[in-house]
Image (cartoon, grey):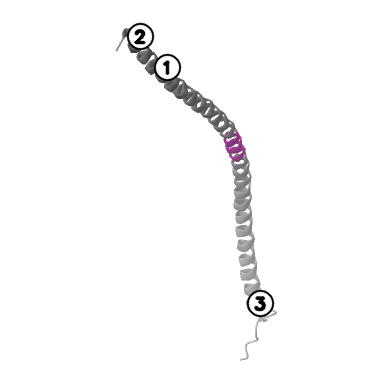
Amino acid sequence: MSEMDELRRRLEALEARVDEVMAEHTTTRNLAVGSDSDVAALQVQRRADMQVIRALRDTQLEHGKVLEAHTKTLHEHGKLLGALVSGQVAMTEQLQAITDHLGVTPPGQPREQG
């Protein structure tokens, strides 16, 4: 094989290798562009998710305040109801003492026959 044939063979091998490298480069570049697009889409989605999370947090804080106010009102109503029940019991006891003293039967109770 002559020196020219050897150079021609080496040049053809080199050109084939350059074609392979260029194809790999094109593929790599396309993958990089696609990845960049995917990352951008993920960033947009992450921002939207964070907005939803912040909105949920704000709503939970508001609901917590409302629940706290309702709890306070419930406790106040419970105390008031307890006072009303105590008053009712005391009035019933007083009424029973009066009716016993007078010897009358309160309305709604059966009369004792004796």
x and y percentages locating residue 84 in the rendered image:
64, 60
x and y percentages locating residue 100 in the rendered image:
63, 78
Mark 3 in CB contact with mark 1 (< 8 angstroms): no
User: What amino acid type should be assigned to the residue bearing mark 2?
Assistant: Met
Mark 2 in CB contact with mark 1 (< 8 angstroms): no
Q: Quadrant of residue 78?
A: bottom right
User: What amino acid type should be assigned to the residue bearing mark 1?
Assistant: Glu
For label 3, the residue is 99
Q: CA distance from mark 3 to mark 2?
A: 137 Å
In front of the other: 66 or 9 = 9
Residue at 62%, 63% (x, y): give it.
Answer: 85
Relative to 74, does residue 63 appear above or below in the rendering? above
Residue 33 in the magenta stretch? The answer is: no
User: What amino acid type should be assigned to the residue bearing mark 3?
Assistant: Thr
For label 1, the residue is 15
Residue 56 in the magenta stretch? The answer is: yes
Of the two numbered discs 3 and 2 on the same chain, state the one appearing first in sequence: 2
Of the two numbered discs 3 and 1 on the same chain, state the one appearing first in sequence: 1
